[in-house]
Image: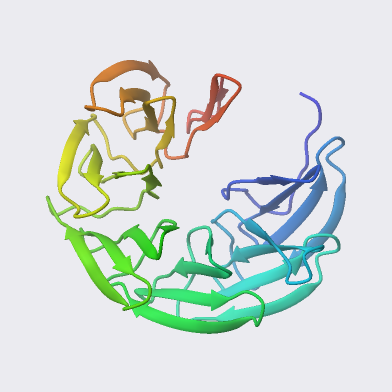
């Protein structure tokens, strides 16, 4: 252990590493910037309720400063200056914000418990549009090439055209919610489901390519790397399956549920389990 930092309340949100700093929020609603070498607190920003989604970052309109974007259960998305934590703008919606904000074409977007997909102009700090997602969104949104991909609590996974604001396709199999955040490849979308399966569908039409069954809900968000898909399950196992056909390549068993998303770096997988252990 190199250092530890103690906050006022439990930390469930994923941490973000940027320019030698760690950015993370807690369940009290505090958002921290820490020195990655020492763990010393550099600044703190207080929201009105718990933070369970990870932060994201983008360049400011001046091309020099960096903005940090984070949502809270106080119904606000905050844009903060990464250097000093000063608030640049805030956007309110009707319900709590769960996932991490996504970025595409100068916009940030997020889903909330209000069943809407909110798209925000980062430079102006104003809502560009809100699109009906049909049910409340638990996870984060993946966006690319003018389309957004997201699962919701009403047992469906959607591809939404951001320009026309229409659903391009809908994937609905068994009557189980999708709270896993999706991963995109050139032609596929991968996401977990509470039906105990990892799903792989085509990006263009949502047709199923393959599914992989586990022994527990798949609330973990998959990572695609080196032709493989890595994902955790509530059965306590970390699975590595082949992207091509969903064939099991290996698995690793922990003593409790894995609901987090794996981190992959330098040929290694790092994952936390609810057994209280971080594995590499």
User: Which picture quadrant has residue 84?
Assistant: bottom right
| Location of residue 95 with respect to 85 vertically, above or below | below
Answer left or right for 154 relative to 110.
left
Q: How many marks?
A: 0
Relative image position of residue 39 (x, y in whole percent):
83, 40
Relative image position of residue 123 (x, y in whole percent):
67, 77
Residue 261 can be seen in this image:
yes
Answer left or right for 49 relative to 30.
left
Q: Give the quadrant of the C terminus.
A: top right
Relative image position of residue 158 (x, y in whole percent):
26, 61
Query: Which colour scheme appears in the figure?
Result: rainbow
Task: Tell me the residue at 40%/65% (across/down).
Answer: 146
Task: Tell me the residue at 48%/75% (across/down).
Answer: 119
Task: Tell me the residue at 19%/35% (across/down).
Answer: 211
| Location of residue 149 with respect to 268 vertically, above or below | below
Answer left or right for 118 relative to 48.
left
Residue 75 can be seen in this image:
no
User: Which picture quadrant has residue 201?
Assistant: top left
Relative image position of residue 194 (x, y in whole percent):
25, 46
| Location of residue 123 with respect to 266 vertically, above or below | below
Q: Give the quadrant of the N terminus.
A: top right
User: Which picture quadrant has residue 76?
Assistant: bottom right
| Location of residue 51 with respect to 40 vertically, above or below | below
Task: Tell me the residue at 20%/31% (across/down).
Answer: 213
């Amino acid at each position: 252990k190199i250092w530890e930092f103690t906050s006022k309340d439990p930390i469930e949100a994923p941490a973000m590493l940027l320019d030698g700093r760690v950015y993370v929020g807690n369940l009290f609603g505090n958002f921290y910037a820490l020195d990655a070498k020492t763990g010393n607190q550099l600044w703190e920003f207080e929201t009105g309720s718990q933070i369970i989604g990870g932060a994201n970052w983008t360049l400011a309109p001046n091309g020099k400063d960096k903005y940090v974007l984070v949502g809270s259960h106080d119904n606000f998305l905050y844009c903060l200056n990464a250097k000093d934590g000063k608030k640049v703008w805030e956007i309110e919606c009707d319900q709590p914000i769960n996932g991490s904000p996504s970025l595409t074409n100068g916009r940030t977007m997020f889903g909330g418990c209000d069943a809407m997909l909110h798209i925000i102009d980062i430079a102006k700090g104003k809502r560009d549009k809100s699109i009906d997602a049909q049910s409340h969104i638990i996870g984060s949104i993946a966006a690319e090439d003018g389309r957004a991909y997201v699962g919701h609590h009403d047992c469906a996974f959607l591809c939404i055209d951001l320009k026309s604001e229409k659903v391009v396709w809908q994937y609905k199999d068994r009557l189980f919610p999708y709270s896993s955040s999706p991963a995109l490849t050139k032609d596929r979308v991968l996401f977990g489901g509470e039906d105990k399966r990892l799903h792989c569908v085509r990006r263009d039409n949502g047709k199923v390519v393959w599914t992989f069954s586990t022994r527990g809900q798949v609330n973990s968000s998959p990572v695609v790397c080196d032709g493989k898909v890595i994902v955790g399950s509530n059965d306590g196992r970390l699975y590595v399956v082949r992207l091509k056909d969903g064939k099991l390549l290996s698995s690793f068993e922990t003593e409790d549920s894995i609901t987090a998303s794996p981190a992959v770096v330098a040929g290694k997988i790092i994952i936390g389990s609810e057994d209280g252990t971080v594995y590499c």
